[in-house]
Structure formats: C-alpha cells, structure tokens
C-alpha cells in the first residue's frame, strides 16, 4: 500500500515538473543562456584558460568552456575563443589527461585548428 502511494506521488510530481517545464517561454531560455555565457566569459583567466581546482584539468575545462561559447553563438574570431585555442595549442605537447586530449576535437569547429589571431 505504501509503495503504491509513493509511486502515485512520484507520478504526480513528474507530471507537475513536466507541465511547468513546458510553460517556460523562449525568451526566458534565451535570457538564461545569455546569463550563463556572461558567467563563463567572466571567469576566463588572462592566459586564455578556465581554471579548475584539480591539477591537470585546465585544458579540458578550457575546451569545454570554449566549445560552450561556440555553441551559444560565439564566432570563430571571438577573442576569448581564440585565446582559449591558443592556450590549448600551447599546452598540447604536455597534456596527459584523456578528456583534455579529446575535448578540443569534440566538435566540427575543432579548437586545435583555430587561427591564432583575430
């Protein structure tokens, strides 16, 4: 009996979450993306990287952040994207972490082949 009540409550909660998620308008989504982009842009380091507290992960984090900017509308000639690409290119010979090696080539707009100057 208790299990049936919990299952019913979970189904109702899922219905409420799904219904409210459908009610979000495109303007709110776009504004949330814009705020996220501002935050990502605001924490890039002067050397072009986005820092991560775990040693050896800056290259992977930098790749993810730069690819995020590109997916959110940044152009190939965006100064922060170029700075990130330069950082990754300069660090490439010493990268040993799997994701830090793989992430620069995760999209058709490969960070490793971007121009070095805007």
Image (cartoon, helix red, strand yellow):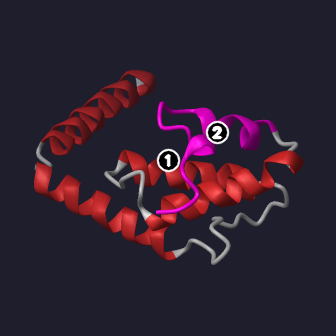
| 3 versus 24 height, above or below | above
Residue 111 in the image, given as x and y percentages of width and height: 57, 45
Report whether 74 appears left or right of 112.
Answer: left
SS of the residue under disc 1? helix
Q: Which residue is at a point 62% across and 67% down the rendered structure image? A: 48
Q: Which residue is at a point 42% across and 51% down the rendered structure image? A: 76
Report whether 17 appears left or right of 105.
Answer: left
Q: Which residue is at a point 16% across and 38% down the rendered structure image? A: 19
Residue 95 in the image, given as x and y percentages of width and height: 84, 47
Span shown in magenta: 98-118
Residue 10 in the image, given as x and y percentages of width and height: 35, 32
Which residue, given by chain and number where applicable, does mark 2 sit on? Answer: 103
Task: Using the image, tell me which numbered label, if any, was put on residue 67.
Answer: 1
Q: Which residue is at a point 21% across and 40% down the rendered structure image? A: 16
Residue 78 in the image, given as x and y percentages of width and height: 41, 61
| 103 versus 4 height, above or below | below
| 83 versus 96 height, above or below | below
- Viewport quadrant of the N terminus: top left
Report whether 114 appears left or right of 96.
Answer: left
> Dot 1: few (<14), some (14–19), or many (≥20) neighbours within 10 Å?
many
SS of the residue under disc 2? helix
Q: Answer whether labels 1 and 2 touch (C-beta < 8 Å).
A: yes
Asked if the magenta segment contains residue 101, the reply would be yes
Q: CA distance from mark 1 to mark 2?
A: 9 Å
């Amino acid at each position: 009996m208790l299990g049936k009540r919990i299952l019913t409550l979970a189904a109702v909660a899922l219905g409420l979450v799904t219904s409210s998620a459908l009610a979000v308008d495109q303007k709110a989504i776009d504004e949330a993306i814009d705020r996220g982009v501002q935050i990502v842009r605001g924490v890039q380091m002067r050397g072009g990287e986005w820092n991560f507290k775990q040693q050896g992960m800056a290259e992977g984090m930098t790749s993810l952040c730069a690819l995020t900017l590109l997916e959110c509308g940044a152009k190939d000639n965006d100064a922060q994207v170029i700075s990130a690409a330069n950082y990754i290119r300069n660090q490439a010979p010493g990268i040993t972490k799997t994701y830090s090696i793989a992430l620069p080539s995760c999209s058709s707009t490969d960070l490793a082949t971007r121009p070095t100057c805007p």
